[in-house]
Image: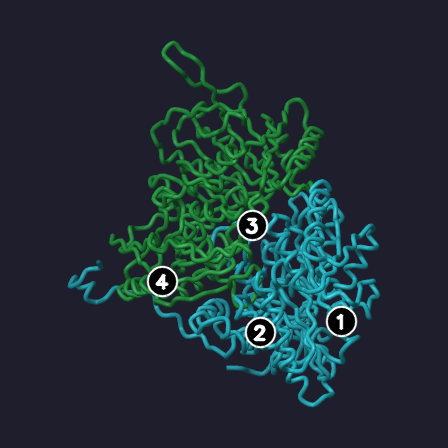
Amino acid sequence: MRGPVPIGELVSICGPERVITEHAALRTYESDGLLQYAVVPAAAVLPDSADEVAAVVAACHRTGVPWVARGSGTGLSGGSLPVEGGVVISLSRMRRILEVDLDNQRILVEPGVTNAQISAAVGPTHFYPPDPSSQVICSIGGNVAENSGGVHCFKYGFTTNWVVGCEVVLPDGSTTVLGGAFGELDRPGYDLLGAFVGSEGTLGVATKIWLRVTPAPEATRTVVAYFNTPEEAGQVVSDIVSAGVVPGAMEIMDKLAIAATEAATHAGNPLDAGALLIVELDGSESECDARFDEVVRFCEANGATGVRIAASEDERALIWKARKAAFAAMGRISPNFYVQDGVIPRTRLPQALRRIEDLGVEYGLRVANVFHAGDGNLHPLVLFDAAVAGEAERAEELAGRIVEVCVDEGGSLTGEHGIGVDKKRYMPKMFSEADLATFQRLRCAFDPEGMANPGKVMPTPRLCGEVPGPYRQHPLEAAGLIDRL
Amino acid sequence: MKSEEPASYEEAAELLRGAAADGRPVRFRGGGTKLGWGRPIPEPDLELCTGALDRVLEHNAGDFTAVLQAGVPLAVAQAAFASAGQMLALDPPLSPWGGAGDDTALDAADAGATIGGIVATADSGPLRHKYGGVRDLVVGVTVVLSDGTIARAGGKVIKNVAGYDLGKLFAGAFGTLGLIAEVTVRLHPRPARTATVVARSSDPAQLAAAAAALAHAPLEADSLDLWWDAFPVEDFQTETGVGLRPGPASGSGAVLARFASADPFPRAEEATALLRRIGDADMPVEIDDDDQACWDAQRTAQRSDVVVKVSALPAALPASMAAAQALGGTLVARAGLGLAWIQLPVCASTGGGGAGRADAPAQAGRTDARGEPGALDAAVVAEAVEELRRRLAPAPCVLLDAPAEVRARLDPWGGETGPVTLMRKVKERFDPAGVCAPGLFVGGI
């Protein structure tokens, strides 16, 4: 039962200036970072407090109106794509840092605070490790919804490993706390926080977030090495990991990615290299020094054609500038591009790259590769020209085939960008009907009416049945005619 | 109670479905090391044992992952990983921690806790400081629900955000949502060498300050623990043998920080220098490079006759130590995380007896003795648990180990902490028949 948006009630909650209903203004919210999809919502609200969020969600619940929470709109899977006739709840006004507790290495923030602001608030002694490349803009609420990663997560873990508690408005408009109520670990009960983080806005909306932070590393050592092939670079990564070295970051770019980033950043990487590998060690001074020579030796032993060690913070920044610009730099070599996000077991890298290359040939499209090498997270970039008839569709199909290769090699549809609307059709490639139906049980416990971000994650719309009644004694048992064995 | 040992997930599904159809309560059993935990419930009709689901299905050494059936004893899996220079960074108590080629743990019958039971109870040990807990190391899970559904969530790669993370939901659910049949875990390199910095003191404030300094230093310790004994005892020679008497100090303890790598000593020395700067002659600091025994002691002290687990913030450590002191108990804590396990004495006497750590290694500098056991006074013990809760509120204090008489007098979970209404809805969706360990969990779920 879906009703009209209760505009009057939303206005009474947030005030007229924070309820947007004009079509032109609403177009601000029609897409997230994945521009292929656009839906103009019926209304957008900009609540200023958790109470306002709860009141808005309660109004939607009462009137049967679907809603989508939105942070900074940088997501890459259409996770915060609006629902037609629904409400967008923008958390961008809720950007207060509520408590910095360095004694306990905790910080309490509102969902609209950006990822980079968190590290800034606890620095320079501490930092918040998950660092998606959009970290200057993306919000922590969005990071929680998507379980965001970044280049440092092989060593430090993902958003889910750093969130210790959330105040959450549930789809019925009630407010609860999942996980630690004051930042503590191991609160008794189901780990609903663990289920909530990464649920892509389908279980509720976080209004306050407790995070752990960690001491900033004393030292950082960065090296970039060049190879003839990505496979050689991949072998270095395997050697490093097998030797028990855990770098803060390990990133590989292939020849096409190097060409694009050189055009954009002039970082000084050789255009004839088949691949480059960035390895960054961080930690204590003594440990970094001890392991750094080992890393350089592994590069040389695997045929590195050149090794560049960052001698200063400026040189380090230049190395990272090229890598962090990789997605945007594709614009230098192609009118359009599509960012894919898949995961493979790291040892399958040679096979996966060969299959991706073959697919590129089959579709007549170029594919640049950038990856978080430690955890096998590939970001193939499919280059195309939308002005050429049919090429955008071919690119999308190719990107889909690539992610199927990842699943086929024992990996995943997505490592950090999420399923959203973009990949929900591939979910049956990775999960059986029984798996999907089991996911839906969780959804139904939180949101039986399906009002929170409907149409995401699950490949097909699903309804929640009534909960079967609890066990009741059988009449024959009651009559003493049978026994429970 | 009937006991079954299914040899396949399908067989487990069939048994569960049958039990659900008849409304017969079921519990799951691995190594049987934590059967007493949770609220006391009547003996169920059916016990599903995971003993026949005991295969290490995959050890992908190059990818640092493994797929384990629920009934695999952790120690058995660790021995397999160790032979490849790897480990699952989980070291809860009652699971022997052996090295490569150490086959003492290989006899499954005495191998202690299974991976299924450890995941179901989210148990952990000192390695949690650096590597996280069960929730952080399980990357995929296969579960069997009471309606016979066999479902998988997560995957076999360490980075994956496809679908809901049901592994975290089932971790620590105590089997009340269904059977964990199989888990995929992330592995880590097994450190070549370890060294532990030990700082001893009889001043709780000094120990807390030492722990805080180490937690804030960028030294990347593998483990950072603390222990405190309210009534250290020492033995003395009597005419007829060895007797026990209270030690010279009222309470003593230590902070332990373990460093691991090819060469852990530079960091251990930095940590030592740091501690010497904040301490004085009252806090001797030394480096122990044969440190397995002192960490085994930390693990072992998480289990006893009466153990309460405290979930607090790190800054509350002094309060936890003070509570342990006042109640005559013994404490071990993950100092950087704020988690503490307090052993309470089972006898009503105060002083001298207590829960002293019989397992404490000599090099940690503590007496190796235990008080004479007194008669259990359940009312006194239950009151001590409640007193602990009052002192440490709002930190949740969960009673883990306790005799049935104590358990019957209070809610081991400490009441309905957290969103119990929502938890009930989750339970109803996953186990609509309500047959998976009903009543055992928080809020009587």
Say which element carries label 3.
strand
Regarding residue A49, the answer to whether it shows in the image is: no
Callout 2, which amino acid? Asn
Residue drawn at (64%, 38%) of the image: B263
3 vs 4, front mark: 3
Q: Which element carries disc 4, helix, strand or loop?
A: helix
Asked if labels 2 and 3 share a chain, the reply is no
Frontmost of labels 4 and 2 is 4
Label 2 resides on the chain identified as A
User: Which chain is rendered green in the image?
Assistant: B
- Whether the residues at callouts 1 and 3 have beta carbons within 8 Å, the answer is no
Q: Which chain is cyan?
A: A
Q: Is residue B65 above or below residue B92?
A: below
Do marks 4 and 2 share a subunit? Answer: no
Residue sticking out furthest to the left:
A481
* Percent x, y of residue B392: 53, 40
Helix, strand or loop at label 1? It is helix
Sequence-wise, which precedes: disc 2 or disc 1? 1
| Residue that carries the numbered disc 4 in the rendered image | B9
- For the C terminus of chain A, which image quadrant? bottom left
Under mark 4, the amino acid is Tyr
Q: Are marks 2 and 1 in contact (CB under 8 Å)?
A: no
Instruction: Locate residue B171, reporting x and y percent.
Output: 47, 55
Q: Which residue is mark 3?
A: B188
Mark 2–mark 1 distance (CA, rounded to whole Å): 28 Å
Horizontal placement of B325 versus B376: left or right?
A: right
Neighbor class of circle 3 (other Cα within 10 Å; few <14, some 14-19, many 20+) is: many
Image spot of residue B111 (x, y percent): 39, 43
Q: Are marks 4 and 1 in contact (CB under 8 Å)?
A: no
Could you tell me which chain the residue with mark 1 belongs to?
A
Q: To which residue does mark 1 refer?
A: A328
For discs 2 and 3, the disc positioned in front in the rendered view: 3
